Image (spheres, grey):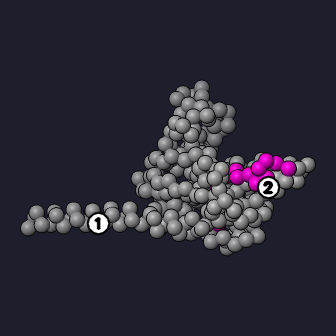
Amino acid sequence: MHFTKLTFLMLICTLAAGASANSLPKTVKKIKPSIVGVGIYDPIGSPRNQLHGTGFAIANGYYIATNYHVVGKGLKGESKQSRIVFIGTGSHPKISHAEIVASDPAHDLAILLIKDKVPALLLMPDDFVDEGIEVAFTGFPIGSVLGLYPATHKGLISALTPVAIPSINANQLSIEMLKRLRKPFFIYQMDATAYPGNSGSPVYTTDTGEVLGIINKVFVKQTKEKILSDPSDISYSIPIKHLRALARSISIDI
């Protein structure tokens, strides 16, 4: 009888693990329509449409969440640049003009308003999630050289850590990092590989697709040039509570 119970428990664990693995493809299929590219249109540039990062739809679908560093650089008035969002997939995505309606440089977040509706993602409550849970994120890690094709990566939440990136010694901490350490806020450290184009990607649970964070940086082991050829497999994301606070500041309920 003891052997039967043990076998039964092992079978339940196996089935549970299988169910978790099988849920990710369904979750990704649900997430992808909400993922957009964020960039600029430059009528005299080459290329004219330039992808700078990733974003995702929130609230009523006309608002896009992304990183501040993706949109924080000013536009060149002399070349009549404008902010745009790329909607859909393939070599001919729909282009929607965008306007920054809220920004939070301290938490590296921005919200854009566009003219075309995109399916909005569901967000988790403000509470921090448990370390060790499986997560995924979808975005554009290598840009749009071959067209707009969102890619999904999987990992896990490995720690809650102060916003400053870990350094080997104190001499490697910048003045900005030292200021943040005096009044740190906590972000998610993830055991997952992300790339520069993933900035602004939503981090979500693999089973429900609810967003818990926004990718904003990776840990660089050596030099920036080595990010693509030798990634560190350590990425960071901003907890969703900071995005919700930014949305509330402009009377958006998410």
* Coordinates of residue 28 in the picture (x, y in percent): 50, 64
Q: Is residue 50 highlighted in magenta?
A: yes
- Find the distance from the CA under tag 2 to the CA under tag 1: 49 Å
Identity of the amino acid at label 2? Tyr
* Coordinates of residue 180 in the picture (x, y in percent): 63, 41
In this image, 250 relative to 211: left or right? right
| Main secondary structure found in the magenta portion | strand
Reading the image, the residue beneath label 2 is 41
**Along the line of sight, which residue is nearer the eye, 254 or 182?**
254
Identity of the residue furthest to the right in this view: 78
Q: Look at the picture and state if 173 lies above or below 18.
A: above
Identity of the residue furthest to the top in this view: 171
Reading the image, the residue beneath label 1 is 15
In this image, 101 relative to 236: left or right? right
Q: Is residue 58 highlighted in magenta?
A: yes
Asked which secondary structure carries label 1, the reply is helix
What range is drawn magenta here? 44-59
Locate the C terminus by quadrant. bottom right
**Along the line of sight, which residue is nearer the eye, 209 or 177?**
209
Identified at 52% across, 50% down, the residue is 188
